[in-house]
Amino acid sequence: MKKTKPSADYLLALKKRYATASKKERTAILDEFVKTSGYHRKHATALLLGQRVHHTHRIQRPRARIYLEEDHRAIFKLVEWFDSISSKRLRVAMNDTLPALRRQKHLQVSAACYKRLLAVSPSTMDRIRATRQRPVSRRKGFTKPGTLLKDQIPIRTFAQWDDAQPGFMEMDLVDHSGGLESGDFAYTLNMTDVCSGWTEMIAVQNKAQRYVFESLKVIRQRLPIPLKGIDSDNGSEFINGHLLRYCEAEQLTFTRGRVGRKNDNPFVEQKNWSVIRRLVGYIRYDSKRHLNRLNRLYAVYRLYTNFFLPIFKLEEKRRIGSQVQRRFDKPQTPYKRLLDSPDVSKADKRKLKALYAKLDVVKLKRELDELLADLLRP
């Protein structure tokens, strides 16, 4: 006969009968209860006497611990090295760099720990990291609109960005006013490739057109791929005849977003926060010393973020009623996305691979920490 766990009502009825029954009747009740439930006789007796609690649900026993303290320390060290990125992105970064980190003696763990690090899932890393998450404050910047030559520069919206070729970049200025708009203060010119997510940044002493223009030319020389087009907001530092003539002479596509519509430049706007603000914050930088230190910091950070920090890329966005569903691709570094692109020349790919082979993510992170400390030093 199949044994079934007795219900609470059935057990309560048996308890009442058992409490008033004679010794012979108790034996019969106990025999019946054991046959019905399949419990051990001692356990069944304790239940009928009320000495134990009857559980009708499945007993949840704790799982055996798979990841040990050594694994936790290693994961937190990896989180530090990779700029506290999300666990899904960190998992991809670990796939790319764990062998090199161990070969370079940065990751000194046991063989068993290394094997577990190769297999740990993003959800497990999330649980391990849960107690160390830090809230980060946010603040909006400001842009003075420019009206000059707007009619000569075509509008391009987010919905029209379907460029599958690397080289089309959005650009924006990030202010470092510290919340005080008076006087001169530094800005960061931020440029992001729409296809690969490759990001370049350079600090300028103010948003004068000539400084922004010179910085754009410096970034163009740094790029690992040819620049094919730029897209900006409507700030006067971008919407001017000097930049328009340059783009026409160099045969660069020049477009702009709509006034007051940040969603027309979503790629660079997102990098303003995830790259620039997370690195240097909202402190005021207004001296020549600050400018030089910012650019030394950016010269290292561009290598760190483009070669070692995987990013998601939106593949599809659908609206269903009041909800918007977004589907992202597998996270990859901008470096890997350029290598996978058929539109990047073999010569450019060879240069990228040669540069990547010389880089060490841990050394870059240590250099970044030193440069950031120097930037924040009075």
Image (cartoon, rainbow, N blue to C red):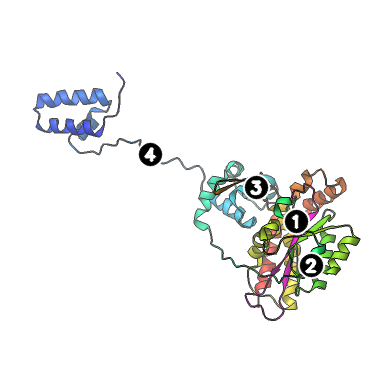
Q: Is label 1 or label 3 in front?
A: 1
Q: Position of residue 167 (x, y in %)?
A: 81, 53
Point out the stretch of residues depicted in magenta: 161-188
Where 281 falls versus 104 (above or below)? below
Q: Is label 3 or label 2 in front?
A: 2
- Circle 3 SS class: helix
- Say whether disc 3 or disc 2 marks the residue closer to the N-terminus: 3
Q: Which residue is mark 4?
A: 60
**Image quarter in which the N terminus is found:** top left
Q: Are marks 4 and 3 in contact (CB under 8 Å)?
A: no
Give the CA separation, mark 3 to mark 2: 42 Å
**Tag shown at residue 94:** 3
Q: Nearer the viewer, residue 59 or 119?
A: 59
- Circle 2 SS class: loop
Q: Which residue is mark 1?
A: 156
350 sits left or right of 158 in the view: right
Q: Quadrant of residue 369?
A: bottom right
